[in-house]
């Protein structure tokens, strides 16, 4: 019996996210001309097709999900690009080193709401064995950005059948900033930007950054997202606050529980983002 593979609904949100699609098309256009390209995580096959459209000599793309790989195969065939795009159904980490030509560019879109959650560093580090000495990663890097969240009033009072859930109202007001009222309508929390970090640096050094910010004292959560950049071109993965329509990314919250500290350490443990309070 062959196991079925899931297709997640966020693929739809991803493919109708034209801000994302235009961003990727622009950085592909800027970087891929006359290059041999390896795309990791081909999904629908759209990015590989765009790379050929904008002048890539050859694209090798890999997709582990067999249903997505089949959809990409059909797209490539329908576009008449079988001679220029080689599709491999599987993980890039399982490709034999000598089975594909050395590449000039590694194209990747492995970013989840947690930018490190989809084995992005492991996959790009492994891809070094396919890359020419001067090969590049596209996009080039990321920049974490966050807002400090403070406020305890829930948008809706918790009660049912005449029973007021006062204790849960107080508890969730402390730990669930996404549910809160904005006590000063029309104003935005201040956004803070950590230093930019290239994918080249990440594959060599992972990620560990200590942030000192006096505005962190007394807040009870950090709302985190990130910028994806390539040269001067950049795109924010998720908007702060409520979810935006047609974006498959969302911000993530780290709960600070009101500790009187002005320092946070953003770091990776087993390729997953962690945040420590000092």
Image (cartoon, helix red, strand yellow):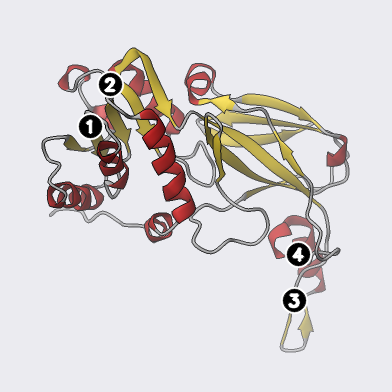
The residue that label 3 is drawn on is 158
The residue that label 4 is drawn on is 180
Question: In the image, what residue occupies the spot 18% across and 36% down?
Answer: 85
Marks 4 & 3, CB-CB < 8 Å contact: no
For mark 1, give the secondary structure.
Answer: strand
The CA distance from mark 1 to mark 2 is 9 Å
Instruction: Mark 2 or mark 4: name the one nearer the start of the chain.
Output: 2
Numbered label attached to residue 187: none
Instruction: Mark 3 or mark 2: name the one nearer the start of the chain.
Output: 2
Q: Is residue 215 left or right of residue 8?
A: right
Which is in the foreground here, disc 3 or disc 2?
A: 2
Instruction: Mark 3 or mark 1: name the one nearer the start of the chain.
Output: 1
Marks 1 & 2, CB-CB < 8 Å contact: yes
Q: Is residue 182 left or right of residue 193?
A: right
Above or below residue 132? Residue 219 is below
Which is in the foreground here, disc 2 or disc 4?
A: 2
Which is in the foreground here, disc 4 or disc 3?
A: 4
User: For the residue carrying disc 2, how many other residues have a C-alpha within 10 Å: few (<14), some (14-19), or many (20+)?
Assistant: many
- In the orientation shown, which residue stands out farthest toward the top? 133
Residue 176 appears in the picture as rendered:
no
The residue that label 2 is drawn on is 103
User: For the residue carrying disc 1, how many other residues have a C-alpha within 10 Å: few (<14), some (14-19), or many (20+)?
Assistant: many
Residue 242 appears in the picture as rendered:
yes
The CA distance from mark 3 to mark 2 is 57 Å
Above or below residue 102? Residue 221 is below
Numbered label attached to residue 60: 1
Instruction: Mark 1 or mark 2: name the one nearer the start of the chain.
Output: 1
């Amino acid at each position: 019996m062959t196991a079925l593979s899931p297709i997640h609904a966020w693929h739809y949100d991803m493919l109708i996210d034209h801000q994302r699609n235009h961003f990727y098309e622009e950085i592909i256009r800027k970087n891929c001309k006359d290059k041999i390209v390896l795309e990791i995580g081909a999904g629908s096959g759209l990015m590989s097709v765009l790379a050929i459209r904008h002048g890539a000599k050859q694209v090798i793309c890999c997709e582990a999900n067999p249903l997505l790989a089949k959809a990409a195969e059909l797209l490539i065939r329908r576009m008449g690009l079988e001679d220029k795009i080689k599709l491999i159904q599987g993980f890039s980490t399982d490709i034999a080193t000598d089975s594909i030509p050395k590449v000039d560019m590694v194209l990747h879109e492995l970013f989840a709401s947690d930018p490190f959650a989809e084995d992005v560093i492991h996959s790009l580090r492994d891809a070094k064995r396919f890359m020419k000495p001067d090969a590049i990663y596209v996009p080039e890097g990321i920049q974490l950005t966050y807002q400090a969240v403070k406020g305890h009033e829930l948008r809706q009072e918790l009660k049912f059948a005449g029973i007021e859930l006062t204790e849960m109202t107080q508890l969730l007001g402390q730990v669930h900033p996404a549910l809160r009222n904005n006590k000063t309508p029309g104003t935005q929390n201040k956004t803070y930007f950590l230093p930019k970090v290239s994918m080249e640096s990440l594959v060599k050094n992972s990620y560990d950054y200590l942030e000192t910010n006096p505005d962190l004292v007394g807040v009870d959560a950090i709302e985190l997202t990130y910028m994806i950049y390539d040269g001067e071109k950049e795109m924010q993965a998720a908007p702060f606050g409520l979810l935006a329509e047609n974006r498959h990314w969302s911000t993530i919250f780290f709960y600070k529980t009101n500790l009187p500290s002005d320092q946070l350490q953003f770091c990776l443990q087993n390729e997953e983002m962690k945040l420590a309070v000092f």
